[in-house]
Image (cartoon, rainbow, N blue to C red):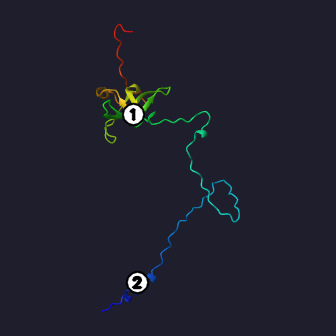
Amino acid sequence: MTVSRLPLIVPLLLLAAAAPEAPPTPTVPDTLPVAPAPNVPPTPTVPNAPSAPTVPKAPQAAAASDLPPSVVLQTFAPKEAMPVLGHRVDEPDGKTVARLVDVLVDPNGQPLAAVLDFGGFMGVGIRKIAVHWSTLRFEPGEGEHRIVLTLTSDEIKAAPEYRDPEKPAPVVVPATPEPKPGSQ
């Protein structure tokens, strides 16, 4: 028994012919026209010359020759300098105890103290203290770029919390040993 498929195909063709035509899909040209800058007269065109849109160049980093003569460009290798804000702070044994979040400077711009973030999880339970700059040891030449806090855990726990930058900062300063009698 032979079954003809023609009766099935004809209704499909009729349906396709009767279906409304879909709107054409918009195409994106390979090049987009560039609008002229405002308040700039258009450039004259040459007849029969190919028109190529002009695209402004992206700004580049200033080269040493672009700097004014009052300054010079100097670079520092990672072994010579390191960023400190947001950097972790370790105990001498290597355990991370805090994160350096701010630096307090004197009127001459010299660092006096570092504000450290201790503890907490996802912003809860964080305790900030300010420690004297001399209590930090920076190791930029090391592979890990460590910052080591030389205070003991008891000294850290006893430190008052640093809360308001608009008020005088309670800074933990290491006590200097008292001079021995007879030594000068």
The quarter holding residue 46 reads bottom right
Residue at the image point whose x is 57% and y is 34% from the top? 72
Point out residue 102 in the picture as x, y percentages from the top left corner: 42, 33
Circle 2 residues within 10 Å: few <14, some 14–19, many ≥20: few
Point out residue 11 in the picture as x, y percentages from the top left corner: 40, 86
Three-letter code, disc 2? Leu
Q: Quadrant of the N terminus?
A: bottom left
Residue bearing the label numbered 2:
12
Residue at the image point whose x is 68% and y is 57% from the top? 43
Instruction: Answer with mark 1 or mark 2, whichever residue precedes in sequence.
Output: 2
Q: Nearer the viewer, residue 94 or 12?
A: 94
Q: Nearer the viewer, residue 96 or 166?
A: 96
Point out residue 76 in the picture as x, y percentages from the top left corner: 49, 35
Q: Is residue 146 left or right of residue 46?
A: left
Residue bearing the label numbered 1:
142
- Vertical relation: 63 (above or below) 163: below
Task: Determine the secondary structure under disc 2.
Answer: helix
Task: Determine the secondary structure under disc 1.
Answer: loop
Residue at the image point whose x is 55% and y is 44% from the top? 61
Mark 1 or 2: in front is 1
State the residue lying farthest toward the top: 182
Q: Nearer the viewer, residue 92 or 101?
A: 92
Q: Quadrant of the C terminus?
A: top left
